[in-house]
Amino acid sequence: MKYLDIEKWNRKQHFKHFRTLADPTFGMVADVDVSKCYETAKERNQSFFVRYLHACMKAINAVENFKYRIEGDKIAIYAVINASATIARPDHTFGFSYIEFSGDFEVFSENFLKEKERIINSSDLFPEKYSLGCIHCSAVPWVSFTSHKEPSSGNKNDSVPQVAFGKIKLENNKKKMPVAVNVNHALVDGYHVGQFFDKFQAELDKID
């Protein structure tokens, strides 16, 4: 595991300041255009959710600060970030998954399907495998939300980013989907969230 040299980090003061706050997290919601992603998924009989989740994970892995995690007084740097997504069951409960990331969509899709099968055939809430090297994500396809709040453990060291995807809405003949991002400000600034949204949109647009 690699660790960040906090003393040489240009955000050293920011890191120490935000760790003194009772709640160092912040979140924001923005729309992304999923028109091409949606059309591609339907044309190929693929899961739209897996398609946009894969694009999201490619963007997450392309932003350095989204790979940082607070571990005690250290900042760990994870080489690869995986997806811990909620997966629904027919009885309207859900389980937490742990989906290994791959830049190859087909491999990522296979990893997703394995986790989906495990969750559908069990009543377990938590996965057998877990690591801080992930993001917590969930889909809320019933609501095109404009604000969103994630549950919190109250632990100021919680630094796993949380992402939620909302219901698609049609706007100027484009399919727009609200996306909520929640992060720990000790590690991530608005600039980095902006980088994520830019890269996420680019990945959604270049799906082939």
Image (cartoon, helix red, strand yellow):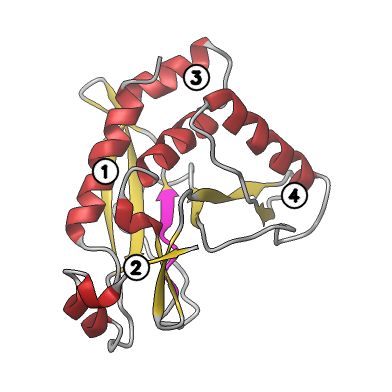
Give yes or no for residue 160 being in the magenta stretch.
Answer: yes
Q: Residues within 10 Å of mark 3 (few under 14, many from 20)?
A: some
Please name the residue that numbered disc 2 is placed on.
Answer: 4
Please state which of the two labelled residues, at mark 2 or mark 4, is closer to the viewer: 2
Please state which of the two labelled residues, at mark 4 or mark 3, is closer to the viewer: 3
Using the image, tell me which numbered label, if any, was put on residue 197: 1
Above or below for 143 versus 110: below
Q: Amino acid at mark 1?
A: Phe
**SS assignment at label 2:** loop
State the CA–CA distance, disc 1 to disc 2.
Answer: 24 Å
Marks 4 and 1, the one that precedes in the sequence: 4
Q: Are marks 4 and 3 in contact (CB under 8 Å)?
A: no
200 left or right of 11 in image: right
Marks 4 and 3, the one that precedes in the sequence: 3
Q: Position of residue 144 (x, y in %)?
A: 37, 44
Please name the residue that numbered disc 3 is placed on.
Answer: 41
Viewer-proximal residue among 95 and 200: 200
Q: Amino acid at mark 3?
A: Ala
Tell me which segment is drawn in magenta.
158-164
Please state which of the two labelled residues, at mark 3 or mark 1, is closer to the viewer: 1
State the CA–CA distance, disc 2 to disc 3.
Answer: 39 Å
Using the image, tell me which numbered label, if any, was put on residue 132: none
Above or below for 151 versus 154: above
Q: Residues within 10 Å of mark 4 (few under 14, many from 20)?
A: few
